[in-house]
Image (tube, rainbow, N blue to C red):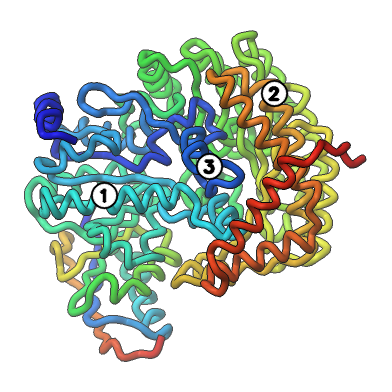
């Protein structure tokens, strides 16, 4: 199960509410397309830096199986490729 | 540990790749009394901590390899999943983890309240202004573990899971401090095998895994425990169909274990010498049900089965509407009581949720909880169900939720009225504060609880109700099983002192006390001042002559 489903690569760190909403909206649609599964790959930011996004995934994407990897711990296996979102991390909290 | 003893212990150790463990607050059978386990969710109050710990979380016997004779059910499931998949894994007592750390590849930890954010820990924390014991116990354990890892095996992976795994996301500094590699949220029997494979093959681990409903295993796929569970707990179903807004269990699909599988686990527990069994479900009376329509045959067969293996059978949870409906339509509670209370067992008990006495609020937040009755009938459903339970020697420990969004003063008054209607029924009623999950971010969760005078009145009504019946329960049933007369005396003395103390309190004093606790948590008050004031008053009332009960 780990690392199956479609992937969302998050470059940088979504911090402001609008950035988190954007990442969450994209994650939700990818999970829907991926049959309820989603791998989020964090690049250029640590898990702790992105913990607001992770909490949002936990609180509001309960219908999906979500795997969060840091720096691409593994590659999604379904061959659909990955969607990417970039954040500069300067958004207001 | 001296070197000679260490070598001897190592020689007797297994070669484990995966250590499954948890701190003492959970790795204890709580003297065979599930409700004593709730003492771990509070700080020691009115008793020295050493005595509090001895009462609530004594060590559990272990075998020569340091494997506990009983272990939390969730850890047993993970152990079984890994063993079934061919991994070298075992549940290990926290005092014996050290001997395996050097060689192991990973430590897996499961907990139902790592940081005391769940109820009732968080209530006790706010009321006393002191860290609950379960939180302190876990933090002590995690500190020891990370020291062992750094000193003996820096490559050791640490994976955390269980029903409270989500709590790590709200204290992310602990993820770093305790060097947690992976957090697993949700039903983990499937994913843990893949994580173990990754660990064994040296592949990188994901940092967070949340198992959604579609990846929850079917009951046929869930492994059978290999070793005994704490107090003989066996799961009979997962999920709940009632859809209460404040509960995450409703997100999980409703699935029932087949009786054959339940029997296999009962056999494991019975063969280890356990005389008692806890049937675990969100609503035991819905075992085998279609939706909320009970299946009396399934429930009766389940209890017949349990009694074949165990002298005592209790439930983890049941819903009061199920109690009333099943009794009215099938006499099901009475039939189960006749079967279970067979002379070897004199009473049974379980947790249940009243949550509110307000039909308006019930309709808003838990319309399905009263079903098939209407939310408007909820207070009557609760009272009639309590009457049925009292008559059949079932003791409910019921929860209330204070401060729900949209709650009015009238809602709280209706809840007070309901608790007062329950005064003749043997039960415990425990109020809990609604803490929005967002409030757990940062360190200021305690500012999110806004208690009014009417809440304080409700707290006192519940406290007096519960202490009155707790004495009855302890003297009539509970203490009969406790082996030490000293412990019985301690428990009864504590309850009597607490009752005298509760009688002396006014709602304003309760509010003032909670405000002081809140200021203490915020660091605005010297730590000792509150403790002294509470302990001083407790001591004073312990010395005071008995006063007659208020009419």
Label 2 element class:
helix
Q: List the single residue furthest toward the right.
A: B551
Residue corresponding to mark 3: B48
Left or right of B529, for residue B332? right
Residue corresponding to mark 2: B475
Q: Residue at x 34, y 41 (%)?
A: B217
Q: Quadrant of residue B68?
A: top left
The answer to whether A11 is drawn above or below residue B90 in the figure is: below
| Chain at tag 2 | B
Q: Quadrant of residue B524?
A: bottom right
How many angstroms separate mark 2 from mark 1 (CA)? 39 Å
The answer to whether A11 is drawn above or below residue B83 in the figure is: below
Query: Circle 2: is it few (<14), some (14-19), or many (20+) Cα within 10 Å?
Result: some
Q: Do marks 1 and 3 both belong to one polypeptide chain?
A: yes
Q: Nearer the viewer, residue B390 or B140?
A: B140
Q: Residue at x 82, y 42 (%)?
A: B380
Question: Where's residue B131, x and y in %?
Answer: 49, 56
Q: Quadrant of residue B218?
A: top left
Q: Nearer the viewer, residue B368 or B312?
A: B312
Query: Circle 1: is it few (<14), some (14-19), or many (20+) Cα within 10 Å?
Result: some
Sequence-wise, the earlier of marks 2 and 1 is: 1
Label 1 element class:
helix
Q: Nearer the viewer, mark 1 or mark 3?
A: 3
Left or right of B326, for residue A28? left
Q: Are marks 1 and 3 in contact (CB under 8 Å)?
A: no
Question: Where's residue B199, x and y in %?
Answer: 13, 49
| Residue B285 in view of the camera | yes
> Tag on residue B144?
1
Label 3 element class:
loop
């Amino acid at each position: 199960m780990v690392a199956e489903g479609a992937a969302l690569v998050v470059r940088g760190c979504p911090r402001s509410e609008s950035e988190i909403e954007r990442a969450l909206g994209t994650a939700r649609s990818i999970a829907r397309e991926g049959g309820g599964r989603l791998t989020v790959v964090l690049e250029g930011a640590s898990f702790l830096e992105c913990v607001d996004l992770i909490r949002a995934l936990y609180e509001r994407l309960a219908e999906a199986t979500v795997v969060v990897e840091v720096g691409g711990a593994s590659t999604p296996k379904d061959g659909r490729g990955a969607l990417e979102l970039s954040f500069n991390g300067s958004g207001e909290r | 540990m001296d070197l000679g003893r260490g070598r001897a212990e190592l020689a007797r150790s297994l070669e484990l790749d995966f250590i499954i463990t948890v701190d003492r607050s959970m790795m204890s059978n709580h003297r065979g009394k599930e409700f004593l386990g709730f003492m771990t969710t509070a700080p020691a109050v009115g008793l020295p901590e050493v005595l509090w710990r001895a009462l609530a979380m004594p060590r559990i016997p272990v075998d020569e390899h340091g494997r506990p004779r009983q272990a939390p059910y969730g850890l047993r499931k993970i152990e079984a999943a890994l063993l079934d998949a061919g991994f070298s894994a075992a549940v290990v007592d926290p005092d014996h983890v050290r001997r395996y750390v050097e060689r192991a590849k990973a430590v897996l930890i499961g907990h139902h309240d790592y940081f005391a954010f769940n109820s009732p820990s968080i209530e006790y924390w706010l009321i006393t202004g002191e860290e609950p014991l379960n939180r302190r116990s876990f933090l002590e354990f995690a500190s020891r573990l990370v020291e062992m890892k750094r000193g003996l095996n820096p490559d050791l992976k640490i994976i955390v899971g269980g029903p409270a795994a989500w709590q790590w996301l709200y204290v992310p500094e602990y993820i770093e401090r305790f060097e947690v590699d992976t957090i697993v949220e949700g039903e983990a029997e499937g994913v843990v095998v893949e994580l173990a494979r990754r660990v064994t093959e040296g592949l990188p681990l994901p940092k967070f895994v949340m198992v959604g409903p579609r990846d929850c295993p079917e009951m046929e796929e869930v492994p059978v425990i290999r070793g005994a569970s704490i107090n003989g707990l066996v799961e009979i179903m997962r999920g709940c169909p009632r859809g209460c807004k404040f509960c995450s269990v409703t997100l999980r699909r409703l699935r029932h274990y087949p009786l054959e599988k339940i029997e296999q686990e009962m056999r494991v527990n019975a063969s280890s010498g356990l005389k008692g069994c806890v049937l675990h479900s969100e609503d035991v009376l819905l075992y085998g049900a279609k939706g909320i329509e009970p299946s009396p045959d399934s429930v009766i067969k389940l209890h017949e089965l349990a009694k074949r293996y165990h002298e005592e059978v209790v439930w983890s949870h049941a819903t009061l509407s199920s109690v009333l409906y099943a009794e009215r339509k099938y006499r099901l509670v009475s039939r189960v009581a006749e079967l279970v209370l067979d002379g070897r067992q004199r009473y049974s008990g379980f947790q249940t949720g009243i949550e509110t006495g307000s039909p308006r609020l019930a309709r808003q937040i838990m319309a399905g909880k009263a079903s098939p009755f209407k939310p408007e009938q909820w207070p009557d459903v609760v009272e009639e169900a309590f009457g049925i339970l009292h008559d059949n020697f079932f003791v409910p420990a019921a929860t209330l939720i204070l401060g729900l969004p949209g709650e009015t003063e009238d809602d709280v008054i209706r809840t007070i009225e309901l608790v007062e209607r329950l005064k003749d029924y043997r039960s415990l009623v425990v109020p809990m504060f609604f803490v929005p999950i967002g409030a757990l971010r940062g360190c200021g969760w305690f500012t999110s609880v806004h208690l009014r005078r009417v809440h304080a009145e409700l707290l006192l009504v519940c406290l007096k109700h519960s202490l009155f019946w707790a004495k009855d329960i302890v003297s009539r049933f509970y203490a009969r099983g406790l082996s030490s007369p000293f412990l019985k005396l301690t428990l009864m003395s504590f309850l009597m002192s607490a009752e005298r103390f509760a009688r002396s309190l006014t709602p304003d004093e309760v509010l003032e006390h909670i405000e002081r606790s809140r200021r203490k948590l915020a660091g605005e008050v010297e730590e000792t001042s509150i403790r002294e004031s509470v302990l001083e008053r407790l001591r004073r009332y312990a010395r005071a002559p008995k006063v007659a009960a208020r009419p």
